[in-house]
Amino acid sequence: AFAASMEALERLAAGGRIAVMCAEAVPWRCHRQLLADAFSVRDWSVRHILEGGCEEHRLPPFARPNGTRIVYPGSEP
């Protein structure tokens, strides 16, 4: 489902700017983090529109890009 959704969003984005929104105020507390990470590893420019302005997306330090996929390793037991 995620891959199909990304393909649909990429088709939309190829035609112009898109915005993905939800009720969460900050992207790192919702699904937008996953979408932003996926767009970033596909070389798209991602900006977060926040109350104080816009900021460029950065992959979290624990994310491990692998081509167009991202691995989020779990913590060690």
Image (cartoon, rainbow, N blue to C red):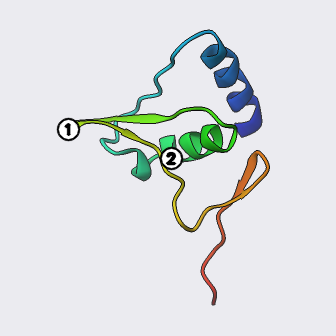
Q: Quadrant of residue 50?
A: top left
**What is the distance, in whole Å, between disc 1 and disc 2 at their CAs?**
18 Å
Which quadrant of the figure contains the N terminus?
top right
Tell me if 44 is positioned left or right of 67 in this view.
left
Q: Secondary structure at mark 2?
A: helix
- Please state the horizontal and vertical placement of residue 8, each as a whole percent of the image: 70, 21
Q: Which mark is residue 77?
A: none
Residue displayed at 21% across by 36% down:
51
Compared across the picture, whether 62 is left or right of 68 comes to left
* Dot 1 alpha-carbon crowd within 10 angstroms: few under 14, some 14 to 19, many 20 or more: few
- Name the residue beneath numbered marker 2: 33
Residue 30 pos. (x, y %):
45, 47
Rate crowding at label 2 as few (under 14), some (14 to 19) or many (20 or more) other CA atoms within 10 Å: some
Mark in the foreground, 1 or 2: 1
Q: Position of residue 34 (x, y in %)?
A: 57, 46
Q: Going by the picture, which residue comes out furthest to the left?
A: 52
Residue furthest top as drawn: 15
Tell me if residue 2 comes above or below residue 59 in the rendering: above
Q: Camera-side residue: 15 or 76?
A: 15
**In what quadrant of the picture does the C terminus appear?**
bottom right
Q: Residue at image x 62%, y 37%?
A: 39
Amino acid beneath label 1: Gly
Q: What residue does disc 1 label?
A: 52
Q: Is residue 75 left or right of residue 65?
A: left
Residue 25 image offset from top left, x and y in percent? 30, 41
Q: Residue at 41% across / 52% down in the picture? A: 29
Above or below residue 67? Residue 56 is above
Q: Residue 44's quadrant in the figure?
A: top right
